[in-house]
Image (cartoon, grey):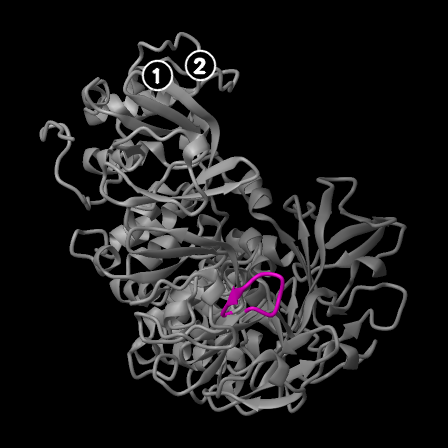
Amino acid sequence: MTFDTELLPNRPIRRGLHLCLGLLAAALILVGCDSNGGTEVPNVSEDNSVAEVVAASQNTGTLESALQQAGLVEALDDSSQSFTVFAPTDAAFGTIDAGELTANDALLEEVLTYHVVPQAINAGDIQDGQTVTTLEGDTLRFSVSDGTVQVNGATVTNPDIEATNGVVHKIDGVLLETVDVVDRAVLTPQLSTLAAAVDAAGLAGSDSPLRNSTLTLFAPTNGAFEGLDVDALTGNSEILSRTLNYHVIAGQRIGSGALPSGESPATLEGGTIDVDLSGDVPTLNGIPVSTTDIRTENGVVHLIDGVLLQRLDIVQRATVTSALSTLASAVGASSALSAGDSPLRDDSPTTVFAPVNGAFQDVDVDELVGNTDLLNEVLSYHAVDGAVTSDQLESGSVPTLEGGSVAVTVTDTSVTVDDVPVTTTDIRTRNGVVHLVDDVLLRGVDAVDRTVLTSALSTTQAAIEAAGLDGANSPLRSEGPLTIFAPLNSGFDGLEVDELAGQPNLTGRILQYHAISGQRIEAADLSNGETPQTLEGGTITVEGVGVDTAAVTLNGVPVSVTDIQTENAVIHLIDGVLLQRINAVERASITANFRILTELVGEAGLADALSGPGPDGEDGLTVFAPTNDALLAALDANNNGEIGVGELPSDSELQSLLEYHVLDDVFFAADVPTMETNLPTLEGSDVTVVRDENAVTLNPNAEASSVVAPNVEVSNGVIHGVDTVLQIPPSN
């Protein structure tokens, strides 16, 4: 039997991998679909060749188009020859990537000729166990059971469609045993991610060991890559090569019946795989095998439900895990921990409690990776010497590579580390084990660094730096113990943060008023009415503990988060800044709504007078402080949003105007009587004050100024913000 050599090149053929889907491939699939899915063969007569039978049959349109593309129609029309065609239906082609097949002419021809036997064989003549040689050059294997014929495992669904030069049998699968492992992956839709990885690793070429060696491949399906960063995997040649080679056993075709239970066959990468056949399905390193014994030209493929990553080191494992991308970036920023001799990469076993991406949501990652020493300290605190699996974890203190210790708590239902839940356990690596945790472990850093790393405390952190309290000798870095009430960023609303940063001494006093030395006072230890002394020297009043109101306050400021533990302190987050220990002028200078008042006080030379206890030197002062808008309404004659020099009263008039807003005594809003009361001011005239329930009004019979921000406590009295500038009454 002879054929035109231009139509049928020499066999066997091994072709390269192509990844683009041609327009023709899409057309083939569209043309080949039969709406009713029937197997009838209309318009076929005894005068049809095998090629014409395929063309005229229902549900073989994809095969017909493929034969045309491969240039095989003319050969299969030859009436001087005799053929048997095993014709995959359109549905059969739907189980493979027909686009990839038709995009590679050589591969297409190889596959199609493997479906053709150069002799006519009727289904009734086929014997169980019989083999025949195909036009491609390899053999087909038959099995017969209860009258059903299978070829290489595909079932003959419509046998014995006679043709002038042979016979056609429709089958429900595409016969791919003649292609190699690489092409088999390319043609299998559920292995497209693996095929792309093989290509990225440079293992798809004609000289690839995956094409030219006998092997067993444990092939991860597309779903097996869920949770992995495929771009990170394929973008790192070392990781990718090691991973792929670990899925290959070279030199052996190990079928499912020959998998060595309890043994550890060596892989192409060099490591071994643990095979377990004791359950309902085989597992490899604990990963289920979902499909077995896919035969190829150079090996056997078993599909698995996960990617075998046990031969990657801890850093590499984090790099390819989507949920650990932030951690991987942080480790990459540390030359000490990402280097090959790092304890996270060398051969000594290590256990890592690895924070998932969500654990970093409240951490200032830029600050973390921007400080090498702090970065190494934090990351090393998450690592423990030795490979400790979940069944080996015990409650107690465990030393870390950083030098401190983490507190492990194990119950029947949970494991925590420093009170942080462990969500996933026992991710094995080449040099240890990884357990995923829900938060970043920061107990190993001191209070200053904890503030630096907390996104919600960035303003407090900037204040600490401005005050010079971030240095090695800072009392906030002392061994402690300390209790710190740290204002959240939102707690600075209404304050002039830049002005605050420009006064380091003032800022330092304010910050030290938020710290208690010598005690680690946790939320459960706070007592209602307690007045602990601060580093600044003053005391803070605690309220709301053990009473009906659930909220705890400090000097009236709510506590929102409690018991953040650090190396030297416990931190509680509060919703405001405690400013009771600064005087009225200092308070006004850092309050955005008193900016103009602060400037006018300076112009009038009253800063010193309003910073002390007042003329009588006893109780202190009450300042009715006009807001910026109030002062602009009274003094900005041209309405340009500024008070120019020409718009200011004379120095003596300005001084008198401001003194008229100050009482030489301390009055809180609740102290003001409900009847009109005249109170003397520093200027000498009286101001009339009246309270109606919670509202306080000044000079109700004149400009009627309302108190809009009452009871701002300062060290030398109290400030009440008012919405109208008070006018000195004319003298009688």
Image location of residue 145, percent across then percent down: 54, 41
Query: Which quadrant does the N terminus fall into?
Result: top left
Q: 516 or 449, which lies in front?
A: 449
**106 horizontally vs 534: left or right:** left
Looking at the image, is 140 positioned above or below residue 343?
above
Whether 282 is among the magenta residues is yes
Residue designated by label 1: 53
Q: 521 or 500, which lies in front?
A: 521
Image location of residue 543, percent across then percent down: 80, 71
Image location of residue 103, percent across then percent down: 25, 32
Label 2 Cα neighbours within 10 Å, binned few <14 / some 14-19 / many ≥20: some
- Measured in 3D between alpha carbons, the distance from the residue under mark 1 to the one under mark 2, in whole angstroms, is 8 Å
Which dot marks residue 41? 2
Say what amino acid the circle numbered 2 marks: Val
Q: Is residue 444 visible?
A: yes
Q: Which quadrant of the structure image shows residue 310?
A: bottom left
**146 horizontally vs 453: left or right:** right
| Among the two numbered marks 1 and 2 on one chain, the one whose residue lies closer to the N terminus | 2
Q: Are marks 1 and 2 in contact (CB under 8 Å)?
A: yes
Which dot marks residue 27? none
Label 1: state its secondary structure.
Answer: helix
Q: Is residue 23 visible?
A: no
- Mostly what secondary structure, the magenta segment? loop
Looking at the image, is 600 positioned above or below residue 278?
above
